[in-house]
Amino acid sequence: MDATAPTAPPRAGFSRYQIFVVAVLSFLQFTIILDFMIVSPLGAIVMPTLHISPQQFGLAVSSYAFSAALSGVLAAGFADRFDRKRLLLFFYAGFVLGTLFCALANSYPMLLMARIVTGFFGGVIGSVVLAIATDLFPLEMRGRVMGFIQTAFAASQILGLPAALYFANRWDWHAPFFAIIAIAVPAGLLIMAQLKPVTAHLALKQEASPLAHLIDTIAEPRYRLAFALVVLMATGGYMLMPFGTAFIVGNVGLPLSSLPTIYLVTGLFTVFMGPVIGKISDSVGKFNTYCFGSLLAMVMVAVWTNLGRSSLPFVVVINVLLYLGIFSRMVPAQALLSAVPDVTKRGSFNAINASLQQFSGGISAAIAGAVIAEGPDGALRHFNWLGYIVMMVLLVALVLMYFLHKSIPEQPARQAPTKELV
């Protein structure tokens, strides 16, 4: 039961402060995702500049994920023992500091350490964002909230990445990190000045120690199904996305110059789709929306991973439909998962989820790398095998989501109002 969320009629409109909160949380996600994504496309500049091998660069990229996974576990015991606003500011300050280290790095060891620091702090922010969204919005509004927050991924693709790559080409590879700092610092100051404390959970009884809090969260039987779902939710993207561009060029036969068009159009549609899907999930039911997204995703994964030589417009349409399926799963899934933890365990629950996502992503990418082989003509072999694996995972996740959904009534319970959204 969401005891800290205000009573509101279904599909109620957002207040001014709620709009501010959603905008701030979405922007935070944008900066975090952009910082995580920007390193990979900078590889062509960073490797010759720092005289490092692809293996070393790959370690620099993956070090963020492993550091984020570790910090999620370490933070879980403390995540519900502080004002969520202060917790958010602490980790966001560390994230900005880590990004500054990236901007100042002039050697491989410095870059590697900078990515570890950035991941350690940045990996926890997403879980705090979700905990705040859960605290401040009732379940019948969370589809729309998660829809806006999830658009951060698309915005980083169509706005952040092109701008960052332009800065890198115009100056050098340090410039994108300075640009992220330039927009992150004002955002942090705005949060400090305008976001109200999020402390309702502190009035409720908690375990005596952070370690006991972590153990109780992990051992809670009701959470195990949710944790299993989180692992499966991360599998599909990490299996297919890392090899997407190579598949488009090597198998589908499109030139590298077509990639910006594909991702730009897909990103624009995704920015539009996120809030719409969130509103639909609040209207027709989150599980119903998840079912639609899962079925569409299974069909489109089968089509996508078996594509042969195709035209650019056709590939764009297929990619857009694939992302429509993905977002129609992600948005309602996040909303339903937000209703699982008790008020006093939301922070630790989301922190553990974040760690599970990172570990699952690393394992999935490793499995994909073991399955995929490159032919002498540059085409990827067995890419369709990954599609079959992902389709099975989507089906299993759908079954698990059915049981999770049955344990979460979508009609909100009677809830006491909170001054945090007044």
Image: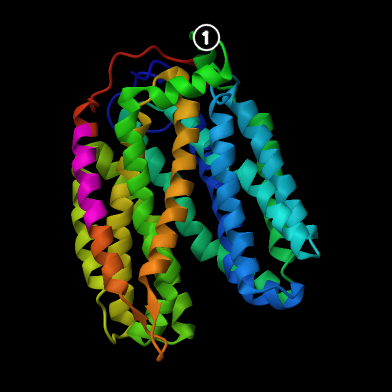
Which residue is at a point 23% across and 65% down the rendered structure image? 300
Q: Which residue is drawn at 50% across and 11% down?
A: 206
Q: Where is residue 140 in the image (x, y as percent from the top left)?
A: 30, 30
The magenta-colored residue range is 392-403
197 or 104, nearer to the observer: 104
Reply yes or no: does residue 391 show up in magenta: no
- Position in image of residue 360 (x %, y %): 42, 49
Q: Is residue 76 above or below residue 289?
A: above
Name the residue: 73% across, 65% down.
175
Image position, residue 380 (x, y; %): 37, 80
Q: Where is residue 144 in the image (x, y as percent from the top left)?
A: 36, 40
Return the residue nearer the eye: 82 or 30: 82
| Helix, strand or loop under label 1 | helix
Q: Can residue 417 be seen in this view?
A: yes
- Taking the view exactly as shown, the residue that stands out farthest to the bottom is 377
- On the rendered structure, is 229 left or right of 243? left
Depth order, front residue of 278/73: 73
Q: Quadrant of residue 109?
A: bottom right
Q: Residues within 10 Å of mark 1 (few under 14, many from 20)?
A: few
Which amino acid type is shown beneath numbered disc 1? Ala
Q: Is the magenta stretch mostly helix, strand or loop?
A: helix
Q: What residue is disc 1 on?
A: 203
Q: In this view, does 145 lie to the left or right of 43?
A: left
Is any atom of residue 182 visible in this view? Answer: no
44 to 32, vertically: above or below:
below
